[in-house]
Image (cartoon, rainbow, N blue to C red):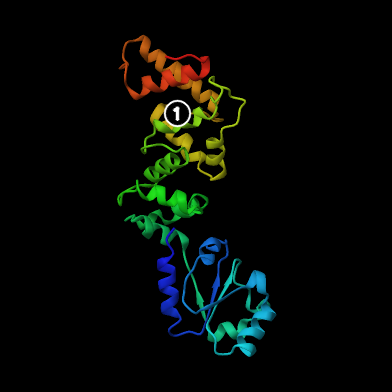
């Protein structure tokens, strides 16, 4: 994610303040902080330097220096804050990662802020965020964003619901046959990033798969059985996405080329 907006805001604040505190309760900006470029401003991390050493440095050793003091934890209560007197005459900077990401993606619907916040693990990677930006449209909904996130994770060529199960199941078919006992790195990434619920919702809306305890093996069976049932009635087009997905799944399960 770009950090220009944060740098611009901090630079502006330092024109009127010598010391700025930045408490980052969830550590959302930990990586961003390390890459900041704000001129001759000196930076201190309270989790590394300590409050007493910080106080001596900014009040006695360098009383005229400009400092950005970053803490990857919550702002302390006044009674527990050894830097309270300094904070009173300084400025406390507050940043909302979700709002910054929302603006960075160019999304118009500001009510998506809560949804973006819930997907913070995905946005922790600059590479994933940049790939997602290429597919985002200003009018996208939460459902659109989730689908495109899943396509980024599954390394789809284009954002498509059809590409998601294909690429997930490919990870379970490395030996040429579908092996439900093997581990899929793609599926592991989806679970680790907390987008598993969105994936099952897309499988329900796009392919009609719904289960109180969903699983990849059951998904494969559903796709195969459903499309063969349709095929037996002659209602499926040979080159439709559903037909292609069925052939792919069958090839994975039975180790044959269809």
The residue that mark 1 highlights is 166
Q: What residue do we see at 47% from left, 61% from top?
A: 97
Neighbor class of circle 1 (other Cα within 10 Å; few <14, some 14-19, many 20+) is some
Residue 103 picture location, percent across and down: 37, 60
Q: Position of residue 148 (x, y in %)?
A: 40, 42
155 or 101: which is nearer to us? 155
Name the quadrant of the N terminus: bottom left
Q: Visible in this render: residue 162?
A: yes
Say which quarter of the image contains residue 12.
bottom left
Q: Position of residue 151 (x, y in %)?
A: 42, 39
Image position of 150 with respect to 29: above or below: above
Residue 153 sits above or below residue 61 on the image: above
Q: Is residue 205 left or right of residue 169?
A: left
- The residue under the point 50% across, 22% down is 220
Frontmost residue, 184 versus 71: 184
Q: Residue furthest front?
A: 40
Can residue 115 be seen by looking at this rendering?
no
């Amino acid at each position: 994610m770009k950090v220009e907006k944060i740098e611009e805001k901090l630079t502006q604040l330092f024109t009127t303040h010598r010391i700025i505190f930045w408490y980052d309760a969830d550590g959302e900006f930990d990586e961003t902080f390390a890459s900041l470029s704000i001129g001759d401003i000196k930076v201190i991390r309270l989790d590394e330097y300590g409050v007493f050493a910080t106080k001596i440095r900014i009040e006695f050793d360098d009383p005229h220096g400009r400092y950005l003091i970053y803490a990857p934890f919550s702002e302390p209560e006044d009674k527990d804050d050894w830097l309270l007197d300094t904070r009173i005459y300084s400025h406390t900077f507050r940043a909302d990662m979700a709002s910054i990401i929302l603006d960075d993606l160019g999304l118009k619907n500001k009510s998506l802020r809560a949804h973006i916040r819930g997907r913070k693990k995905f946005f922790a990677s600059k590479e994933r965020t940049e790939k997602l930006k290429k597919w985002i449209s200003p009018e996208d909904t939460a459902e659109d964003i989730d689908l495109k996130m899943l396509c980024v994770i599954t390394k789809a060529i284009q954002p498509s619901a059809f590409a998601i199960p294909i690429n997930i199941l490919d990870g379970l078919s490395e030996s040429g046959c579908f092996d439900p006992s093997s581990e899929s790195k793609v599926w592991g990434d989806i679970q680790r990033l907390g987008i598993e619920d969105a994936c099952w919702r897309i499988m329900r809306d796009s392919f009609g798969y719904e289960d109180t305890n969903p699983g990849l093996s059951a998904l494969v069976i559903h796709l195969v059985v459903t499309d063969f049932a349709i095929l037996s009635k002659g209602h499926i087009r040979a080159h439709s996405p559903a037909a292609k997905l069925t052939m792919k799944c069958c090839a994975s399960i039975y180790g044959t080329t269809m």
